[in-house]
Amino acid sequence: MVLKLSFQSWDQIDWSLVERTVKSYRYGIFLGTKSGDLKRVNYLQNRVLHSKSVLLWAIRRVTLINKGRKTSGIDRFSISKDSDRFALFEKICLKGIRSFKPLPVKRIYILKSNGKLRPLGIPVIIDRVIQDVTRIALEPQWEAKFEHCSYGFRPARSCHDAMIRVYKTFSRKRKTFILEGDISGCFDNISHDALLSRLEDFPGKDLVAGWLKAGYMSEGKYFDTLVGTPQGGIISPLLANIALHGMEEALGIQYTKLGSIVAKCPYTLVRYADDFVVLCTSLAYAEQAKQILSVYLAKMGLVLSPEKTFITAGFTGFDFLGWNFRLFVDKHKRSGLVTLVRPSVKSIQIVKEKMRTIWRSAVGTPIASKIRDLNSIIIGWANYHRYVNSGQIFRALDHFNYLQAVRFARRQHPMKSWSWLVSRYFTKVGLDRWCFYDNTLKLVLKKFRTHKILRFLPIKYGFAPDDESLAPYFESRKRKNLYDKFKSVKSMLFMLESQSTLCPVCGETLAPDVDNLIPPDLHVHHLVSRSVGGKNTFSNLMVLHSECHRFAHRKKLSRIMLITSLKKALLRSNLPSYVLVKFKWGNINRSVKDKTSDVADVLDV
């Protein structure tokens, strides 16, 4: 059997068309579920499971975008070449996704913060691809059903949305008794029968059952999986959310049309994966909530962890998702109380230990590589905690790094004077005289306090990215989060604004697919290579996805090709006219809107 395709290699694929096809399927499944048209939902899900566009999208995600793309399963097979990706696509198309029997996952263990080991299951590449296809078919249906309290492993939702929800509820000073809940071994103990019964008439139910029963290999031995979903699989987080769906309903929580909980309800539930908090109006209600949820979770084969489930009062404070929420007395406030959200003590201790380890290993080694490692930790930690009351803690961590830098300098050069050490390792940046740097590469150590405290805008009640009518809202939200991510890197921010956060090669947004504030791997590309006289000026630089950057070099895309492609991507977008004015490579006339494709058309492939 020979496949009849409009393209004959990976480079000839029109990714903008693939993306539109995938989104149209997701929109249709979501709207069908909302309207109650289950017959159409099942029809579209069947189409997704056999769609070539969805399969291409899944292969691209698994082998190019995901962080674990280079990790192999029990077959020790991974994909790094475009020819191998296209060969995998042809293989699955010819045989069909149901012809591949799920293989056992490779069991590995990672160390948890409490010293225990967490098991991870790594599927083979083909299983990961088919899981992603199944996820695309199943996720929109459940996004139309999921409760508003769920924030973990869902599109367009993040830890910061959960934080804002807890903060706003806690700030009203009414629900000041908190049930901190943690489900013991959530992924490992979910009942297969209870989970599959929730999938009802889903066409890929047999595929899900196969992955659940596939077993795992550990130290060369095979083990059956009678319960649980393997942590590490692409579809596992979605299955866990399906299993935990209904906790709000069990507590009797109801919402008004505007998205606020009705006044008579004594509970507010906020869940991120298997961690959750229930804010209650009294201690008795907190105890009652614990009993209700214990009974509900038992139906899915789950139990609350006795070590991590307890009830606390607002003035004592509680930790959730790396932050500490606590009520303080403030006589200047009308209510006499103020709610503060700050990084938890445990989070501060962890980041200090990471930085201390790097500083200790820096003695006797080139300092530039250590500065890069420290900068990566500083930027990531500061970006995560910049939406809470972190100013004082940022300054304390900067002082910690200063003391570590002085200790390093004295140990590196024990016979040198203080003035020599200062001139060798410290420089002035702006008004700050004490910036640690490498005087060879002029690489400066970042500071926590350069990350300004920002306000996070949470997702609105009832909004989902699979609702086509809300596409402009989520696009603007993704752009804002990407701008916030690079707010302290003005050069990157300027380039992103000039491109309106669009990649000139694929025409897709440079912002992440989900609002987890972790952008995709972005590279800066020289339109005219520096080897032939190109300069490090903004007119010669563009931001690309990492895989698009490799494609641009492999195909030797010229400056004119990339600028033309970016113009077409901007014209196809729904961006307002005032955004297009920022384009710095010429003028854009929306009246002559071009509907043609992107780089593939320019290359004439």
Image: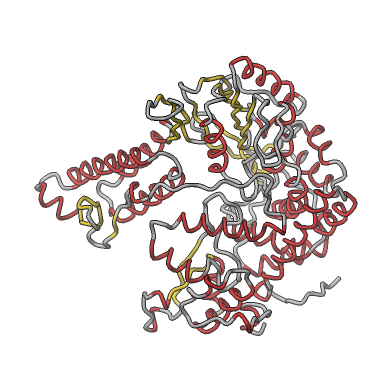
The image quadrant that residue 534 belongs to is bottom left
Pick the quarter of the image with the N terminus: bottom right
Q: Residue at x 48, y 68 (%)?
A: 543
Q: Residue at x 85, y 52 (%)?
A: 41
User: Is residue 460 toward the left or the right of residue 300 in the image?
Assistant: left
Colouring method of the image = secondary structure
User: Is residue 440 toward the left or the right of residue 324 in the image?
Assistant: left
Residue 295: x %, y % from top left = 73, 21
Front position in the image: 533 or 89 = 533
Q: Please, is residue 582 above or below residue 128 in the view?
A: below
Q: How many marks?
A: 0
Q: Residue at x 47, y 71 (%)?
A: 498
The image quadrant that residue 509 belongs to is bottom right
Q: Which residue of the protein is positioned furthest toward the front in this rendering?
A: 334
Q: Please, is residue 16 above or below residue 173 in the view?
A: below
The image quadrant that residue 63 belongs to is bottom right
Residue 220: x %, y % from top left = 65, 39
Residue 26: x %, y % from top left = 75, 56
User: Is residue 603 toward the left or the right of residue 440 in the image?
Assistant: right
Front position in the image: 17 or 211 = 17
Q: Which residue of the protein is positioned furthest toward the right in this rendering?
A: 39
Q: Residue at x 22, y 59 (%)?
A: 439
Pick the quarter of the image with the C terminus: bottom right
Q: Which residue of the protein is positioned furthest toward the top in this rendering?
A: 284
Front position in the image: 564 or 357 = 564
Residue 369: x %, y % from top left = 34, 54
